[in-house]
Image: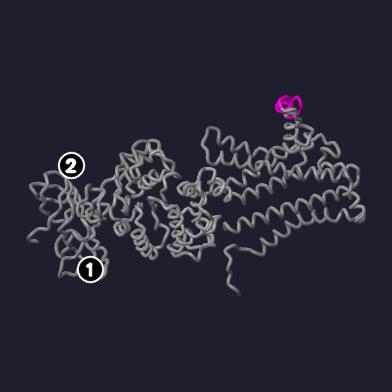
Amino acid sequence: MTARLSAIPGLRLTLGVTLLWLSVVVLVPLSAVALRPFHGGGDAMWATLADARVLSALRLSFGSALLAAALDVPLGLLLVYAIVRLRFPGRRLLDAVIDLPFALPTAVAGIALAALTAPNGWIGAPVQEVLGLKIAYTRAGIVYALMFTGLPFIVRTIEPVLRDFQREAEEAAATLGATRGQTLRRVVLPALAPALIAGFGLAFARAVGEYGSVIFIAGNVPRATEIAPLLIVIRLEEYDDAGAAAVGLAMLVLSFAVLLATSLLQRRLRASVA
Amino acid sequence: MTVEMIDVVRRFGATPALEGVSLTLREGEFTALLGPSGSGKTTFLRVLAGLEGSDSGTIRIAGQDVTRVAARERGIGMMFQSYALFRHMTVFENVAFGLRVRRRRPPEAEISARVRRLLDMMQVSELERRYPAQISGGQRQRVALARALAIEPRLLLLDEPFSALDALVRKEVRRWLRGLHDQLGITTVLVTHDQEEAMELADSIAVMERGRIAQFDTAQRLLSAPATPFVAAFVGEAARLDCEVRNGMVRFANEALGSVCADLQDGPATAFARAGDVFASSGGGGARVVLVRETGGGRRILVVQAGDAVIDATGVEGEHLSRGDTCGLTLRGGHLFASNGSRVTIVPPTDPA
C-alpha cells in the first residue's frame, strides 16, 4: 500500500462528485446547445446566423457588453479605492449598496432604470434637456443597464487585492522620488492589473447574457436596439428552436473566446507576480 | 549630512508617539535607535523620512529646514522592515525605479550602468532578471538596499533590517552592512530592538523610551553610565533589585542578597545588576541555582532563584555550583538609582566578606 501524501481526504470521492456535477449542470446542457443547431443541417444554421437581424443583435450584445465592462473598470477602481482606503461616514452603507445589483431581480432593476432614464424620468429629463441625449430606448440605455449589473463584479474582484496591497510599497515609491501619479501608474495599477482583467471578464460575462434589466430600457427595435438574448426568446416563441439554438451557439462561442482571452492575459500578468 | 531633529512631537489621536525628541546626527555617522516596541522608534524614522507628519518641532538636514518637505523631495533612502519591493518588477527594475521617476531622467545607458554597479556592490548581480518572489530573504534585503542607494541619498534609514533573516545569516549581513557603511560613508540611522545589533553596528545609540530619547551615547557609555533606570535595565539586560539605603549601607528587599556600601542619600532605591555584577557563593543564603548556562571559555552563568526573583549570576572563583545547589548572592558592581534619579556605581567591597 502506498503512503497517503495528501492531507485532503477522499480525492476520488471529491473528484467524482465534481465531474458528475459539472456534467449535469454545465457540460450536458452546453452540448445540447452546441448540437441542436445542426439538426436542420449546417446550411440552415449558417442561413440563420447570416441574417442581418441576427448579426445586428449579436454585434449589439457583444459591443455593448464589452463597452459596459470597460467603462465599469475605472468606475469600479474608484469605488474600491473609496471603500478600502478612505474613511468617511456611510462607508459601510456604500459598501453594502454596491452589492445590490447582485441581489435585485434583474427585471426590477430594468424597470427602475427605464423609468429613471425615460424622457420624463429623473435622469432622462435633465440629460435630454441639457445634452440633448436620449438614454432610454437607445443603445446608450443598454450600456447603462449593463454597467449597473456589472459593476459589483469589478468592485468585489479588485477589493481583496487592494486590501492586501502593501502600503509600504507606495511609501517606498515616495521615498524614491515618485509623485502620487507615478506611484499609481507604476506601482499600484500594475499590481491590480490581473484583478482588473478578471473583474472585466466577469462583468462582461454577466452583461452579455443579461436579459431582464435590458429589455425594459432597450426599446427592442429589430436591427437597432434588439439584443441577442431577446432574439433567442423571440425565435423560441416562433417555435424556431433551431434558430434560437444557432444564436445561442454563436453567443457561446464568442463569449468563450472573450473569457479565454481575458484568462490568458491574466495568467501572463500573474506569472511575473507569483 | 548633519541631521537635526529639534523638539519633534507626533501624536496619534491622544496617544503620543514622539514626545519632544531632539537629536543631532553627525555627518557620516552610523546611529542606532534602540528601544522596546512601542517606544516610538519607527515613528521617529517615518517622521524623519517624511512619511509621517509632525505636530510640532523642526527637522533640518544639512542646515536646510525640511519639516514641511514631502518625502519624495527629501532625498532620503529608506529600507523598510518588509523590504517593500515592487513585486511586479524585476530586480533590475526595482533598483532602477528611483532613477526612472526623476523629473530629468538619466539616459538609459547611465541607468543600467548605475543599477549594475549597485547590484554588483550588493553581490547580487546575477539576479537582475528575477522577480522578488523568486529570490531569498537575504537577497531581497540586498536588492532593497540597492534600490534605496540608487537615488544617491544623503541619509539612509534602515527599519529593523535584520528581523526577517534567520540568526545565522543575520550576523554575517550585519558585518557586511557595517563594512558597506564605512566604504560609502552615508549618514545612517538604524532602528532596532536588539541591543546586541545596535552595539555591534552603531557609532552611537539613542535609547528610546515612551516617545522620548532616554540617552544618546556610545555603547560603552550606555553600559558604564546609564542615565536612567530604564536605560540601565534595557541596555544591560540587567536584573532590577529594590533596596533601601541607610547611612551608606544598601539593604536589599530580596533577602538572598547581602548588603553593600554605596554613597547615596537615604531612602528607597533601585539597583540594576548584570550577570557579571552578581556573584554567587556556596553555603548559606536563600538562593538556589535553577539553571547553568555555559558561555564558552570555561565561563558559566548561573541562573539563580532568589525569592520571587530570577537573577543571572557568576560563580565566585574556585567554586563549582551545580543545579539545585543553595547559595548566597553579593553585588560587586552595577548601578544604583535613588528615587530622585541620581545614580551611583556600586563599588565592590574592598574586603569581600
What subunit carries mark 1? B
> Which comes sooner in the sequence, label 2 or label 1?
1
Visible in this render: residue B132?
A: no
- Name the side, left or right, on which B197 lies relative to B323: right
Number of disc labels: 2
Q: Which quadrant of the view contains residue A12?
A: bottom right
- At label 1, which amino acid type do we have? Arg
Q: Which residue occupies the extreme bottom position in the image?
A: A1
- At label 2, which amino acid type do we have? Asn
Visible in this render: residue A51?
A: yes
Asked if the residue under mark 1 is in contact with the one under mark 2, i.e. CB atoms within 8 Å, the reply is no
What subunit carries mark 2? B
The boundaries of the magenta stretch are A117-130
Q: In this orientation, which residue lies closer to the viewer: A122 or B189?
A: B189
Q: Is residue B338 magenta?
A: no
Q: Residues within 10 Å of mark 1 (few under 14, many from 20)?
A: few
Mark 2 element type: loop
Q: Are marks 2 and 1 on the same chain?
A: yes
From the image, tell me which residue sits under label 1. B299
* Residue drawn where x is 69% and y is 52% of the image: A262
* Residue drawn where x is 76% and y is 44% of the image: A63
Q: Which quadrant of the view contains residue A267?
A: bottom right
x, y percent for residue A124: 73, 28
- Name the side, left or right, on which A111 lies relative to B115: right
x, y percent for residue A38: 89, 56
In the rendered image, which quarter contains the C terminus of chain B? bottom left
From the image, tell me which residue sits under label 2. B340
Color scheme of the displayed model: one colour
Mark 2 vs mark 1, CA separation in Å? 37 Å
Q: In this orientation, which residue lies closer to the viewer: B280 or B147?
A: B147
